Image (tube, rainbow, N blue to C red):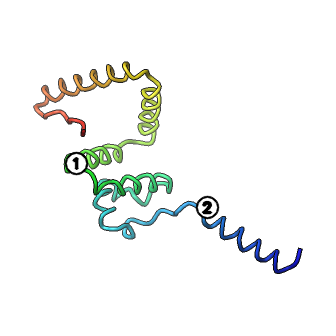
């Protein structure tokens, strides 16, 4: 193979590798104001998150402007709750979610109803209204 062709193929291969490489997450100060608003509950922990988690949260932030105020509040509440969990609690939550998704739809609805009733009972006992899901 001629040297020019080899160099051209090498350059093309390098460009393809660069294009396929994942976008690296950015430090908190480099996020846009809109991203910072959406991800505010994670601000103090942002730098310690793995890149794949940062990318996941940045994708959530991309959808944030289209949410209703109630949905935005719910997202912030959930992000704050999630940020306070330990890594072990994160893993437990993931396992529960995977098991829940394997249930038949009718059973999932029954479980959701039971959880709503439990939350309503706890809220009534504490005097705090239960969190209602966003539409």
Q: Viewed as shown, does residue 25 lie left or right of 112?
A: right
Q: Nearer the viewer, mark 1 or mark 2?
A: 2
Q: What is the residue that sits farthest to the bottom in this orientation?
A: 4
Q: Position of residue 121 (x, y in %)?
A: 18, 23
Q: Position of residue 124 (x, y in %)?
A: 13, 26
In the foreground, 10 or 88: 10
Q: Which quadrant of the figure contains the N terminus?
A: bottom right
- Identify the residue shown where x is 33% and y is 62%: 35
- Does residue 74 sit above or below 19 in this rendering? above
Quarter of the image for residue 78 reads top left
- Identify the residue shown where x is 30% and y is 57%: 38
Q: CA distance from mark 1 to mark 2?
A: 35 Å
Residue ID for mark 2: 20
Query: Callout 1 environment at 10 Å: few (<14), some (14 to 19), or many (20+)?
Result: some
Give the mark nearest the N terminus, 1 or 2. Answer: 2
As helix, strand or loop, the secondary structure at mark 2 comes to helix
As helix, strand or loop, the secondary structure at mark 1 comes to helix
Q: Position of residue 62 (x, y in %)?
A: 36, 57
Q: Position of residue 37 (x, y in %)?
A: 28, 60
Q: Viewed as shown, does residue 24 lie left or right of 116?
A: right
- Does residue 124 sit above or below 15 in this rendering? above
- Identify the residue shown where x is 22% and y is 27%: 119
Q: Viewed as shown, does residue 132 lie left or right of 40?
A: left
Query: Callout 2 environment at 10 Å: few (<14), some (14 to 19), or many (20+)?
Result: few
Q: Which mark is residue 120?
A: none
Q: How many marks?
A: 2
Quarter of the image for residue 97 reads top left
Q: Viewed as shown, does residue 11 lie left or right of 33?
A: right
Q: What is the residue that sits farthest to the left in this orientation?
A: 127
Residue ID for mark 1: 73
Q: Which quadrant of the figure contains the C terminus?
A: top left
């Amino acid at each position: 193979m001629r040297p020019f062709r080899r160099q051209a193929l090498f350059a093309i291969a390098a460009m393809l590798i660069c294009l396929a490489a994942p976008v690296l997450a950015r430090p908190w100060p480099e996020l846009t104001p809109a991203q910072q608003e959406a991800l505010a509950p994670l601000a103090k922990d942002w730098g310690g998150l793995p890149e794949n988690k940062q990318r996941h949260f940045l994708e959530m932030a991309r959808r944030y402007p289209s949410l209703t105020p109630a949905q935005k509040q719910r997202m912030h509440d959930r992000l704050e709750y999630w940020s306070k969990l330990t890594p072990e609690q994160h893993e437990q939550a993931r396992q529960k979610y995977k098991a829940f998704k394997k249930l038949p739809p009718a059973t999932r609805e029954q479980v959701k109803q039971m959880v709503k009733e439990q939350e309503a009972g706890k809220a009534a006992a504490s005097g705090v209204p239960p969190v209602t899901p966003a539409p």
